[in-house]
Amino acid sequence: MATADLLTASHTLELAAPLPLDGGQDLAGVQVAYETVGTLNADKSNAVLVFHALTMDQHIVSPHPKTGKPGWWARSVGPGNVIDTDRFFVICANVLGSCMGSTGPASLASDGQPYAMRFPVITIRDMVRAQVALLDALGIDQLHAVVGGSMGGMQALSFAANWPQRTRAALVIASTARHSAQNIAFHEVGRQAIMADPKWNGGDYYGALSNGGKGPENGLAVARMAAHITYLSEEGMHEKFGRKLQDRPDGTKGAKTFGFDADFQIESYLRHQGLSFTDRFDANSYLYITRAMDYFDLAEEHGGKLAQAFAGSNARFCLVSFDTDWLYPTAESRTIAHALNASGAAVSFVELSAPFGHDSFLLDVPALDRVIKGFLG
């Protein structure tokens, strides 16, 4: 089915009032870019807000304007689909701090120059606060559900905890209530790769880009390579790549070069992932969004007790983990489930088997499709 047949629309909203941030600042002129799919019913009770992961954006079903690839969850959202747009009005907004239309480091500040590193450090709750303002502008008082995987799951948890009366259900997939030391460590490697790139220039590289030059593409590519490893499973990498060698441009089949080119197929794959990422993502946005994820600690926000975060919520919760996800392993979801039980919330939890690691929520896992469809009702 063509995207045009999905009743899809792209919008940008400028918030009427400055957005208060957890860091203490008020950010004026905030723009929120978002996509809607389906039709909002008369009483505005069928809205589902989908939160995207770190490197995704608002283009949940429509082709990406820079890469031309299908929307990041096009396989799951649509008429008669897992998230059925014959029934639900789906909203997906680009997060604050990103680079696909919502206000971020590449946006112009009041002096007409890009914010760059003058942009305030933000949190997951700040991202959600911007989307609550979007719902207010749309006149949607209560959602049918919030849905998110990975960083999107963090936002779903934050929404349900901090705006407990604004949703009737929350579906959290492959996520966590706080970042572990290991998660923070991987992000720090990526940030240091970006900041070590001479073309990062203290974050002030937008002038070079506007004049046809380059930003810190090498550093951003390395950051993406390191992160991408965490999205995969050892089983999946072994099955797809193993220790297979690359065929050489001269036609030589699978030979070692005894040099430092990409001899192994996994090396070539990671290099491709890194370089293609630089075509669609801003390096400074990567710094800010990964920092927001690292700061996320839902228990800390609520007196040090995770159960307390959900004390005011009457929503139904569903938590999903994957047995090969070592970035946010099943134990993380169990911790959230225990806290929800302690708070008296209605919660279901399932660990699914899939060979794809953390990225399973984006790929073809029929069991996940059944869970989502069943939970949304």
Image (cartoon, rainbow, N blue to C red):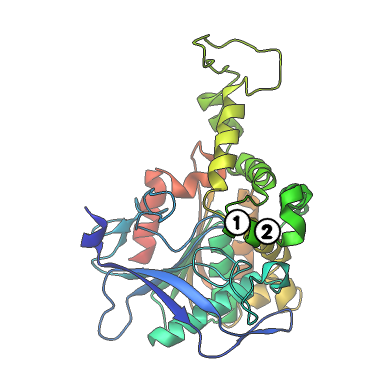
In this rendering, is residue 375 above or below 232? Answer: below
Q: Looking at the image, is 261 positioned above or below residue 286?
A: above
Q: Quadrant of residue 150?
A: bottom right
Residue 226, compared with residue 125, is above or below; it is above
**Residue type pointed to by label 1:** Leu
Tell me whether circle 2 and circle 1 mark residues in contact (CB < 8 Å).
Answer: yes
**Horizontal side of residue 87 vs 111, given as left or right:** left
Q: Which mark is residue 205?
A: 2
Nearest the eye: 128 or 250: 250
Q: Secondary structure at mark 2?
A: loop
Could you classify mark 2 by the number of other residues whose Cα lies within 10 Å: few (under 14), some (14-19), or many (20 or more)?
Answer: many
Question: Which residue corresponds to the image point at 72% horizontal and 54% vertical from the top-left?
Answer: 200
Say few, some or many: other residues with alpha carbon within 10 Å of mark 1 (under 14 / 14 to 19 / 20 or more). Answer: few
In percent of width and height, residue 312 lies at 58, 83
Residue 12 lies in what quarter of the image? Answer: bottom left
Q: Residue at x 64, y 73 (%)?
A: 113
Placement of the C terminus among the 4 image quadrants: bottom left
* Residue beneath disc 1: 209
Q: Disc 2 marks which amino acid?
A: Tyr
The label on residue 10 is none
User: Residue 333's spot in the image, x, y percent?
Assistant: 60, 57
Q: Could you say where residue 358 lies in the image, as x and y percent from the top left?
A: 56, 46
Q: Residue 219: give x, y in percent of width and height.
A: 70, 46
At 70% across and 74% down in the image, what residue appears? 120
Q: Quadrant of residue 180?
A: bottom right
Q: How many marks?
A: 2
How far, Cα to Cα, is label 2 from label 1?
7 Å
Local secondary structure at mark 1: helix
